[in-house]
Amino acid sequence: MAKNLEEAIAEAGNPVELLWESQTPPAVVPRVVQEFSNWRDEQLAWRRTAVLFDQSHHMADLNIKGPDALKLIRDTAVNSVENFPVDVAKQYVAVGPSGHVIGDNILFHLEEDEYQAVGIPPSINWLHYHVETGGYDVEIWRDDNSLYRQGDPVLYRYQIQGPGAMDVITAASGQEPPKLKFFHMTRLTIAGKEVRALRHGMAGEPGLEMWGPWEDQEAVHSALLEAGQQFGLTQVGGRAYHTNALESGWLPRPLPAIYSGEELRGYREWLTDRAYETTAPLGGSFHSENIEDYYVTPYELDYGRIVKFDHDFIGKDALQKMEQNGETGRRKKVTLVWNGDDTAEAFGSIFKPGPKAKFINLPMSLYDTFHFDRVEQDGRTVGVSTWTGYSANEQSMLSLAVIDADLAEPGTELTVVWGEDTPSSKVQVEDHEQVSIRVTVQPAPLTEQARTAYRQD
């Protein structure tokens, strides 16, 4: 019986087989009501009024404190940390020795020599591993998501966002919040409780992410709901929550580039048999026996603006070589807008005799944690489509994709292949036939507000 990821790969024969046949359900938002009203109105509300996201349960927190905390971050992040004062956050991005993405998280600078990384497991595990093996003078505490932890979270984490977000926060705190630059932090008082807040907004609308000790959550949550009544504040449930990334253009789950390379053997041996990276299912119409065909670079995810070579970090040499060889612009992240008629025909096949398309769940359509569909032009694979779902705001199926850069011009027509042609034994994959769905290339983020003004004010 495998005790770690390295042994699990050996038992399966290769990493693709391990993940392709994983019987673990796809990752979800645990312990959050699936729909408070209905997911369509919840989606519409983040563009029209204001919404409350409960982010307390689906992410892991890693608190890092000590004299070597910044050194740990500098050694593992593509980001520069030369200007990283207290009360500022960064989107921490980590790559492996090959320069391919392991994961990202939001890294909060809380106090002098104290930072907190918040996100899904790949980048949290990567930091945790280097704390345990790198000899850094730091202390950590970790709080995993509610699928893994026993009891309540250490912290609550709420986000208020939308055109009316600041009105809600003003009413709840009794004073207008200070004007903050993007990813800057402040402190508020709500219901008599001190609340820390980050200027953020996951669907491109203005808002704050707020957190504090779990014992304060009921008082703060109630105060936010009461204050939001006059502004049409809508709670967003688990079904709609993940679809906001379709509009904001952030690709949440790149496959971590850890499954190959002798340099990463120690890390694979550190990750347990139950780790996210060991059990998360892989699927879609794109299938390759080479796990490295699923890896992406930071440039392909539009993180080239984050990469800075002013410090030594894992993967630096590989990224510099990519830049020197002109490899950074080969593929580009885009939004694909699915053709409504083709999508309707595929979905409608469940009502007709004969072959069925792979069922399209709504609003999020993924049937795995790591999802890769082929994007084609005239039968030739030109990229992969990943995060997929329906947006009531756009009245369209959308997906985030990485495609050849010469096809990334908005308006370009391509095709997504939906369904598996290498059938797996995943329980969520029924008998089906692949279908081709026309798509139109658009920018990522899709909305102009998310691409421009929202990061600048």
Image (cartoon, rainbow, N blue to C red):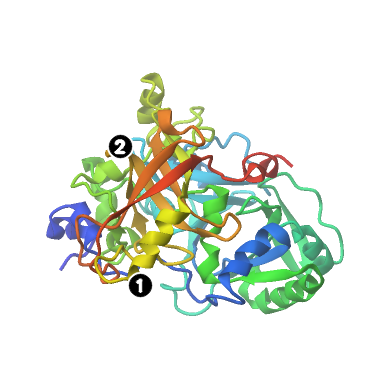
Residue visible at 57% across and 66% down?
55
The reply to whether residue 133 is in sight is: yes
Residue 397 pos. (x, y %): 48, 56
Indicate which disc residue 378 carries.
Answer: 2
Specify the amino acid type for callout 1. Phe
Indicate which disc residue 351 carries.
Answer: 1
Marker count (numbered): 2
Front residue of 350/87: it is 350
Residue 112 pos. (x, y %): 64, 49
Specify the amino acid type for callout 2. Asp
The Cα–Cα distance between marks 1 and 2, rounded to whole angstroms, is: 29 Å
Residue mark closest to the camera, 1 vs 2: 1
Residue visible at 15% across and 59% down?
12
Front residue of 109/296: it is 296
Q: Secondary structure at mark 2?
A: loop
User: From the image, which quarter does the N terminus lie in?
Assistant: bottom left
- Decide if residue 389 is on the left or right side of residue 232: left
Residue visible at 23% across and 41% down?
261
Residue 49 pos. (x, y %): 73, 62
Q: Secondary structure at mark 1?
A: helix
Q: Find residue 43 and report its image quarter.
A: bottom right
- Decide if residue 113 is on the left or right side of residue 192: left
Indicate which disc residue 244 carries.
Answer: none
Relative to residue 269, is residue 326 depicted above or below?
A: above
Relative to residue 45, is residue 147 depicted above or below?
A: below
Residue 208 pos. (x, y %): 69, 57
The reply to whether residue 64 is in sight is: no
Q: Residue furthest right?
A: 175
